[in-house]
Amino acid sequence: MTVSPLAAAVHTAAAGLPELTAGRLIGTWQLDPYALVLILLLGGLYAGGVVRLARRGERWPVARAVAFAGLGLGAIAVATMSGLAVYDHELFWPAAVQNIVLDLIAPLGLALGDPLSLALRALPQEHPSTRRLRAAVSGRLVRFLTFPLVSTVLVLSSELAIYFTPYFPTALRHGPLHELMYLQLLVVGSLFVLPMLTREELLPSWCSHPVRALLVLLDGLVDAVPGIVVMTSGTLIAGGWYASRHQPWDPSPQQDQMIGGGLMLTLAELVGLPFLIAVFAEWVRDERRKTAALDARLDRDLAVSAPATPAAAAAAPGAAAPQPETTRPWWETDQGEVGARFRGER
């Protein structure tokens, strides 16, 4: 694997870039200090939470840690420091793929890691940081931004605003704004994904697991819109910028944009399936937790209402013979969701 020169040198000397091949796309990397700091910060906080739980004798699922580090942080690294970042100032389609990775793939990996639950478990329950985190999670602003309709509109409008306003060409010219665009894509994408897979309190009460699955299906259709619009648009996105850097081995600007839009559409649809599978997996785990809690409560109720043993009854002189106790069926007294289903109330 080769490491390219510094990002600034690459961006200002785009005419010197060799032809983009599959090998160069995979093997060419550059350092993005801002992205590296973000990755180290998120990874360090997550690892600290896992270590704190381990010291208390509690286990954190390995699969969640792998998803957070591998798919979440790994996707951020690929988008900002791989060949996609090296060539995003040379061709449009690497920049388009870059943005989809930050907008859809990285948030999915971070959400599968369930960092909020880890933080709430790792921090002491009465610690001010814990109270502030709980207050922020349940606050009106966060609940508004994570409301399914609002977060879906934010993701769509964020993508369209980047490509069909001066935002994107300006970001290509100014590095700090480009980094801010990366962060915007990551945060906006997380607003929809994170509540669907982790924190139920961020969602309205009517947003059950079946409703979430339906919302994910609808979101997959919405996520396809930017790719379709980019692919079919007659207006070149940042056309002046890419035309000034066109090289003989580059596709034409029109072809470049069609390739970028097609890859955006393809990646958006590919991400939809694992996202839906993850929602169903959370649904199954939640049903198992409810069933286990119900079984434990029924066992306790049966233990309390169990009649005395024959030996104990005989030991009590003059005691009256125990009368059989009438016990109501459990579904008539259960106030939970399962009991309501058995009573035909839902």
Image (cartoon, rainbow, N blue to C red):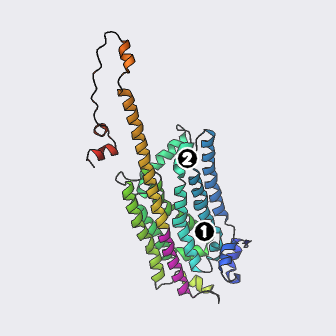
Asked which secondary structure carries label 2, the reply is helix
Identify the residue shown where x is 63% and y is 47%.
Answer: 48
Boundaries of the magenta span:
249-270
Q: Is residue 205 left or right of residue 285?
A: left
Please state the horizontal and vertical placement of residue 345, each as a whole percent of the image: 26, 47
Residue at point 47%, 52% (across, down)? 198
Q: Nearer the viewer, residue 40 or 179?
A: 40
Q: Which residue is mark 2?
A: 119
Q: Of helix, strand and loop, which mostly describes the magenta segment? A: helix
Query: Which residue is pictured at 59% across the width and 82% down the height?
Result: 241
First-in-chain label (1 vs 2): 1
Is residue 11 depicted above or below 310 in this figure? below
The kind of residue on which mark 1 rests is: Ala
Q: Residue furthest bottom?
A: 248
Q: Quadrant of residue 336?
A: top left
Q: Amino acid at mark 2?
A: Ala
- Left/right of residue 75 with respect to residue 279 in the rendered view: right
Of the numbered discs in the image, which one, if any, rests on residue 53?
none
Residue receiving disc 1: 79
| Viewer-nearest residue: 9 or 17 | 17
